[in-house]
Amino acid sequence: MNFDFYMPVRVVSGRTALADSAAQLKKLGDSCMVVTGKRSAKASGALDDLTEVLRREKISCTVYGGITENPLLSSCEEAAALAAEKKAAFVVGIGGGSPLDAAKAIAALAANPGLDREGFFKKAWKNPPLPIVLIGTTSGTGSEVSPTSVLTVDSVKKSVSGPELYASLAIANPAYTGTMSYNTTVSTGLDAFCHAVEGYFSPACDDITGYLAEKAMPMVYRGLKMMRPEMEMTPAFREQMYYGSLWAGLVLNAHGTSFPHPYGYVLTENHGIPHGKACAVFLPALLLHCAQYAPEKMERFLRVLDTDLPAVNQLLDSLSGVERISMTKEEIQSYRKRFTGLKHYANTPGAYSEEQGLRLFETLFLK
Amino acid sequence: MNFDFYMPVRVVSGRTALADSAAQLKKLGDSCMVVTGKRSAKASGALDDLTEVLRREKISCTVYGGITENPLLSSCEEAAALAAEKKAAFVVGIGGGSPLDAAKAIAALAANPGLDREGFFKKAWKNPPLPIVLIGTTSGTGSEVSPTSVLTVDSVKKSVSGPELYASLAIANPAYTGTMSYNTTVSTGLDAFCHAVEGYFSPACDDITGYLAEKAMPMVYRGLKMMRPEMEMTPAFREQMYYGSLWAGLVLNAHGTSFPHPYGYVLTENHGIPHGKACAVFLPALLLHCAQYAPEKMERFLRVLDTDLPAVNQLLDSLSGVERISMTKEEIQSYRKRFTGLKHYANTPGAYSEEQGLRLFETLFLK
């Protein structure tokens, strides 16, 4: 039993979360930079709601809309230069994981002009990042409640993490996930499920995080079981998926991830599979591994989900679409170096290794 | 459903929590004031462990040991003057609720020399409080994870609360509760149970806090059921009671308390009943009220505790010792003004009133 806990983000949730946060925003300063992707910030209504609150509070704002999926460090550098030029006092990210992760990086870069990339990833920061505000529009990332930013540099995903990167404020309005497409809803839901499950089976999982995961997992799993392309995604469904992803985010925040995440990065980078689906491809293998090395926990996991392992795996397979991917032996071997020494292996019961990973890739993708 | 959450304290728990926190302490500065009561800081070993870590980290420290049960604002003022004189960079409280609450007040007063009492309670603070570190030695207060300080001024309990009063760091080592007497264990356990139950039945209780309370309540209740003067209080029992009190503290942090708390203050001030027992005296009345105004929640509460209402009430009565107290009609009427307009009434399902409170006092104490 223990009670280790650190998640200092103030989360304000519900349909009026942005308006309810006006005074908190004003406390952060009189000017901000708003970071978005192409579509969801506008389509969800979040950007309009924010603009209205900023106007009322007399907070000036500059919008940077150039964040793409799997956000580029170079875009963050561009946005940070603009934020510094405009003397932004804080940074607001609106979107899925990409703009939220980008906002964290931009806040750090804007506060440390002239910092090179190595210094950025080593957190050789002279000044703390600008305060960060995050407004989620997808239900998967957990970025709102975690101190991690995953960026793409030279076509490879790299992450930076630390307590300085927690948001001051997360505005959690499930209505902003209401315009998410079916496919994004599936993929982000799978991401949330991976966060909860990978953390739940982490050897570091304890009394407190186990309890949080046992809240997150059935919320998200019940939603995943309802997924059909023709389904009506009601506000209640959106709410369940979004808050489920935040509960899962608390687990992610405490324990990080296991091997499905770094393996998934490869599918995203080289096969264009969206992040959540890409991680979920490897979740059945993790579950099989856990059944062997953490059988009692597995029993509890299945009891919490009220199901059996074949049913979970079938659902994951049907939603993640593993059958679309094929690789040559050479491609698989080319990942050896990348799979060596991953810190995620120690975060897996009974550990894991690059050899096991390469064999898993052969089983799944060698056609 | 919602996901409002704010509890920014970094909680480091377990048997090596203090040593594990050395680097965090050093970040707070090179000098500190340590605030304790008479006994537990020393007897528990916490003060010695702290002194050792401070020595190794070259952090100078001044100990103020003058905090009594139901801490006096005047003692806090005295300690704050000393902290300012010694240029303490942060304040460490070690003890039960009294030294922890006092540490919060001292941190605010030391940062704002010359502030009068009215200004203190109105939080007319020019400077933020010094960083606060809390080390609990009892399993009840929840002060470690809440932003409230309850002080005694002119023999009356007054509280001050706000996000500035959160600790930077809480060091949660259940071993430090190991020298607590049986009576203190009972009283602080009752306090924790009240925090969880009063918050659970708060009309503001939601998805997230309900879940936290449903973790806290059975942990503490199972412990209370084991209470016998001749019992052996094992490390596992101490751990369950202490971490249970922290879970309950998360509920307290979110929703504050209902009428048992302010009514309990009266028993503490005028009849010398320890705080936890004093609050628990009124919990059966709250539960009866809840059974009427929140019957479904009551059903769930009993299911979570795996018991029935008479059993809960009997346990509370036997542990709180209500039969010792007797009051005259005049004494009870003298509390009318004090019971009028309490904010706690709105934090009770179906609300509550001073008339109901005065009748309750007559039923319980008019002999």
Image: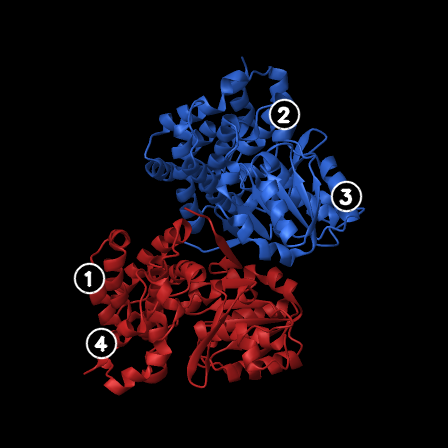
Chain colours: A red, B blue
Residue at 35% in and 76% down: A339
State the SS at label 3: helix
Q: CA distance from mark 4 to mark 2?
A: 74 Å
Q: Which mark is residue B335?
A: 2
N-terminal label among 4 and 1: 1
- Check contact, mark 1 vs mark 2: CB within 8 A: no
Let me know if residue B342 appears in the view: no
Give neighbour class at mark 4: few <14, some 14-19, many 20+ (Cα, 10 Å): some
Determine which residue is flagged by label 4.
Answer: A364
Q: CA distance from mark 3 to mark 1?
A: 65 Å
- Residue B200 is situated, as x and y percent measured from the top left of the image, at 44, 41
The residue identified by callout 3 is B82
Q: Quadrant of residue B37?
A: top right
Residue A245 screen position, x and y as percent: 39, 62
Compared with A170, A107 (above or below) is below
Where residue A78 appears, as percent x and y from the top left, is 56, 84
Q: As drawn, which residue projects farthest toward the top?
A: B367
Q: Nearer the viewer, mark 3 or mark 1?
A: 3
Cα gap from disc 4 to disc 1, whole angstroms: 19 Å
Query: What is the chain identity of the residue bearing mark 4?
Result: A
Work out how far the residue at label 2 is from the one at label 3, CA to CA, in angstroms: 37 Å
Label 1: how many residues lie within 10 Å, few (<14), some (14-19) or many (20+)?
A: few
Q: Which residue is mark 1?
A: A311
Amino acid type, mark 3: Leu
Question: Is disc 4 placed on a helix, strand or loop?
Answer: helix
The answer for which chain carries disc 2 is B
Toward the viewer: A351 or B120? A351
Chain of the residue on which disc 1 is drawn: A
- Badge 2 element: loop
Mark 2 neighbour class, 10 Å CA radius: few under 14, some 14 to 19, many 20 or more: some
Nearest-to-viewer mark from 4 and 2: 4
